Image (cartoon, rainbow, N blue to C red):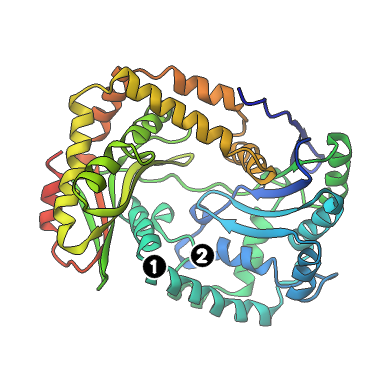
């Protein structure tokens, strides 16, 4: 049995939540700072501003005026550092050898509290982000995931690309970035997680020293997502590719719905690992794809289950039909006790392996806190999964895999979606 993750959670006077998780069997420490904001908190005019702001934090502070002043410090100690923007939270992390813990805190707090947002850098970075958008558009595996959200949620924040579009990038001004920063980067909206070889008492004092200057305050909330569908839906992105990439699945459950555990196990049975149903039927037996997997995606207000695959252009209809047939089968026949047990053991193993490093532990703890305002232990999560029965899996499958909930996003050399609509409607 994996040892429990020990941690201490404290709230500073300015509202910042601090989580410290000491880890003895490592020589590293990770500082992860999360803010509860992302693309779902944007308006159409400034779609992409969360991601734009994330980039700008690395462009110079009062103490470290140039990008290289920031990066050279962390490169100089062999540290890892980066940032990421999602739909509901944005994160900044530094991972270093324990001896450089103070440096990690100093740098990450400096960029978040004292960035200059220089006008020249804002305009320069605009071009960088446009190239990032171009890169994503040229990568079908990434593009199809963007299409998936657009298909499910349409013209609202949940359906817009996290990085924005070239059009919105052209319109976002420096003032827009600073206004967004002032509204969202406040104490009540921040979680600082420290995981690694450090003493919890000392770590807390140091975090307080560096992050107590963060402005107190409450951020503004995101709007409600319109999550309605009454017929099978297909979204095609016509592109001349050597391989067609798809996301095929159904609407699912949000983070607060207990059925998410059932859906997660069902996704594992269907497409988790090289002995899963999808891998065997779609790849091994029929040779239709190179990659295929099934996953659950859950946010605070939305959720879905989807199978991703890269398919020979001449065999797309056959592959779609095969995936649909596996969805139909799990509705029709109960999963055996042994197959469900294997899925539970698969998730248990992946969970333990995924918490070996300090950055993994920081993300596990901080991610739960920022999204759910609570932290479940690994054993609490696995206990929920362990209680799932074959009957529950079949019940959720029958609830999810119905024509009016089915969706297919596709990037490939196709223009007519009628045949695909017919195929996914045969669920």
Q: Nearer the viewer, mark 1 or mark 2?
A: 1
**In the image, residue 314 above or below residue 397:** below
Q: Is residue 230 visible?
A: no
Q: Residues within 10 Å of mark 1 (few under 14, many from 20)?
A: few
Q: Quadrant of the rendered structure where residue 191 is?
A: top right
Q: What residue is pinned by disc 2?
A: 48
Q: Is residue 348 above or below residue 326?
A: above
Between residue 368 and residue 95, name the one nearer to us: 95
Task: Kindly indicate whether the residue at mark 2 contacts the one at mark 1 (C-beta within 8 angstroms).
Answer: no
The quadrant the C terminus occupies is top left
Question: Looking at the picture, does residue 343 appear above or below residue 33?
Answer: above
Label 2 crowd bin: few (<14), some (14–19), many (20+), radius 10 Å: many
- Pointer 1 or 2: first along the chain: 2
- Residue closer to the observer: 165 or 363: 363
Q: Which mark is residue 390?
A: none
Q: Is residue 141 left or right of residue 289?
A: right
Q: CA distance from mark 1 to mark 2?
A: 19 Å
* Residue 143 as seen in the image, left or right of residue 186: left
Q: Is residue 105 toward the left or the right of residue 292 in the image?
A: right
Measuring from the top left, give residue 15's x and y in whole percent: 75, 41
Identify the residue shown where x is 57% and y is 37%.
353
Residue 371 in view of the camera: yes
Q: Secondary structure at mark 1?
A: loop
What kind of element bears circle 2? loop
Image location (x, y in percent) of residue 341: 39, 22
Looking at this view, is 139 or 170 the one in front? 139
Residue 268 sits in which quadrant? top left
Residue 359 x, y percent position in the rendering: 67, 46
Give the labeled residue for mark 1: 139
Which residue is depicted at the point 57% across and 61% down? 50
């Amino acid at each position: 049995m994996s040892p429990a993750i020990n941690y201490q959670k404290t709230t500073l006077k300015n509202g910042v939540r601090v989580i410290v998780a000491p880890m003895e069997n490592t020589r590293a420490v990770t500082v992860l700072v999360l803010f509860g904001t992302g693309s779902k908190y944007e308006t159409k005019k400034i779609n992409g501003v969360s991601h734009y702001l994330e980039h700008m934090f690395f462009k110079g502070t009062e103490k470290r005026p140039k990008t290289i002043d920031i990066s050279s410090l962390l490169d100089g100690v062999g540290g890892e550092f980066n940032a990421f923007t999602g739909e509901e939270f944005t994160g900044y992390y530094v991972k270093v050898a324990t001896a450089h813990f103070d440096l990690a805190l100093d740098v990450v707090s400096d960029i978040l509290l004292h960035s200059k947002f220089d006008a020249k850098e804002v305009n320069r970075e605009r071009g960088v982000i446009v190239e990032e958008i171009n890169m994503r558009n040229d990568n079908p595996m990434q593009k199809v995931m963007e299409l998936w959200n657009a298909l499910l949620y349409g013209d609202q924040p949940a359906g817009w690309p996290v990085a924005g579009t070239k059009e919105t990038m052209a319109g976002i001004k420096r003032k827009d970035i600073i206004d967004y920063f002032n509204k969202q980067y406040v104490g009540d909206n921040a979680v600082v997680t420290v995981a690694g070889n450090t003493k919890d008492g000392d770590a807390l004092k140091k975090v307080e020293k560096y992050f107590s200057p963060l402005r107190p305050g409450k951020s503004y909330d995101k709007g409600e997502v319109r999550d309605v569908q009454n017929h099978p839906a297909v979204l095609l992105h016509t592109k001349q590719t050597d391989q067609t990439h798809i996301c095929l699945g159904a609407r699912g459950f949000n983070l607060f719905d207990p059925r998410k555990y059932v859906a997660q196990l069902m996704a594992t049975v269907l497409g988790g690992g090289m002995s899963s149903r999808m891998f065997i039927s779609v790849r091994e037996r029929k040779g239709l794809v190179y990659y295929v997997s099934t996953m659950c995606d859950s946010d605070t207000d939305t959720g879905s289950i989807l199978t991703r695959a890269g398919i020979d252009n001449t065999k797309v209809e056959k592959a779609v039909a095969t995936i649909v047939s596996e969805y139909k089968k799990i509705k029709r026949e109960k999963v055996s006790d042994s197959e469900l047990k294997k899925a539970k053991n698969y998730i248990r193993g992946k969970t333990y392996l995924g918490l070996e490093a300090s950055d993994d532990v920081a993300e596990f703890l901080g991610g739960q806190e920022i999204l759910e305002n609570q932290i479940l232990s690994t054993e609490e999560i696995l206990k929920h999964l362990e209680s799932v029965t074959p009957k529950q899996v079949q019940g959720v499958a029958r609830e999810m895999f119905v024509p009016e909930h089915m969706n297919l996003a596709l990037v490939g050399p196709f223009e007519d979606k009628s045949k695909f609509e017919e195929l996914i409607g045969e669920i």
